[in-house]
Image (tube, rainbow, N blue to C red):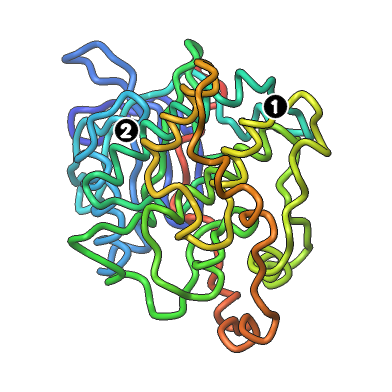
Amino acid sequence: MKKFGHYEVTAELGRGGMGVVYKGFEPSLNRKVAIKCLAKHLLDDKDLVERFTREAKATAALNDPNVIQIYYIGEEEGQPFFAMEYIEGRSLDDLLKGGNTLSVSHAKNILKQACSGLEAAHKIGLVHRDIKPANMMITNDGILKIVDFGIARTREYGDKLTNTGEFVGTPGYLSPEVCIGKEVDARSDIFSLGIVFYEMLAGKVPFENDSPLGLMLEVVQSEIPDIRTLNNKVDKKTSYILNKMIAKSPDERYQSCSDIIRDLGNTIDNQDIKAIQSESKVVKHTVTKKKISEQITLPGVATVTSNQLVTTQQKQPG
């Protein structure tokens, strides 16, 4: 039986170019775990090894019910690995496949949980940078877990592992500032989460293009269709919250996830929300094509990737 430290491997969950995720078992505590290891052929790449270890340490620093929990970081015969919470459930990506939409109340519940997890990360200076449905797992009990901090940025490391002008993340969920190569902070995660919220309500992301460059041009340039034209069940206050999350300018967005949580609560209590005051300029904000052309180049676009470290999408436990 294959082992990583004191963890026994029971099945393979997923494999990518940079690593493998296994389902495992910890005999001493009688619990299932997920084990993520770096591919052996990459062990000589110090930057990738550091990035892999950084993911584990960054996630382990969080103790929030809406972030996947790291149990152990170690090596097995020189191969780095970490053991983490095994999630009995499926990804939000699975729920939305085929253009499925969620009810407004269900979408708001998921948004609130995601905000809670991201707020915990942002408070310690951790920006996820790849928020998307595939990195949001939902347990069988309805608890959301944010996973895959592999390209997260911390105050400690900054962009040490990311070259200037290199884009990281997933086209379609990138913030405008990522698309034009500017510095990012927690507000970039808020934009990406807003796109996820939009997708939950509309059944699709607001940007549609076959190429990464085309997608990024749309993110920076295009006005986003009002969600209420696509889903008439969305109330005005909820649409205001969404619009503020996906404002083109970071300064016009919510400045923290806690503000979003507060406004979500106020929609239930029928109180005023912060988003209403800026709704009109959020949707109309655009950037000129000349400015984008000066800052986006095809070589840069070629580096736009999903996190190549395989995610822990435990779709079919068993």
Q: Residues within 10 Å of mark 1 (few under 14, many from 20)?
A: few
Residue 235 has which mark?
1
Q: Is residue 219 above or below residue 144?
A: below
In the rendered image, which quarter is residue 43 located in?
bottom left
Residue at 62% x, 31% y: name it.
238
In the rendered image, which quarter is residue 4 located in?
top left
Q: Is residue 89 above or below residue 279?
A: above
The residue carrying mark 2 is 2
Visible residue check, residue 318: no
Residue at 45% x, 47% y: name it.
254
Q: Amino acid at mark 1?
A: Asp
Residue 199 has which mark?
none
Q: Nearer the viewer, mark 1 or mark 2?
A: 1
The total number of labels drawn is: 2
Position of 122 with respect to 246 (left or right) is left
Mark 1 or mark 2, earlier in chain: 2
Q: Distance between the Cα atoms at labels 1 and 2?
A: 53 Å
Q: Is residue 228 above or below residue 252?
A: above
Q: Residues within 10 Å of mark 2 (few under 14, many from 20)?
A: few
At which x and y percent is residue 47? 29, 69
Secondary element under disc 2, as helix, strand or loop, is loop
Q: Amino acid at mark 2?
A: Lys
Image marks 1 and 2: residues in contact by CB distance under 8 Å? no
At which x and y percent is residue 274? 48, 39
Visible residue check, residue 240: yes
Residue at 43% x, 56% y: name it.
18
At which x and y percent is residue 64? 28, 28
Q: Quadrant of the N terminus?
A: top left
Secondary element under disc 1, as helix, strand or loop, is loop
At which x and y percent is residue 23? 40, 27
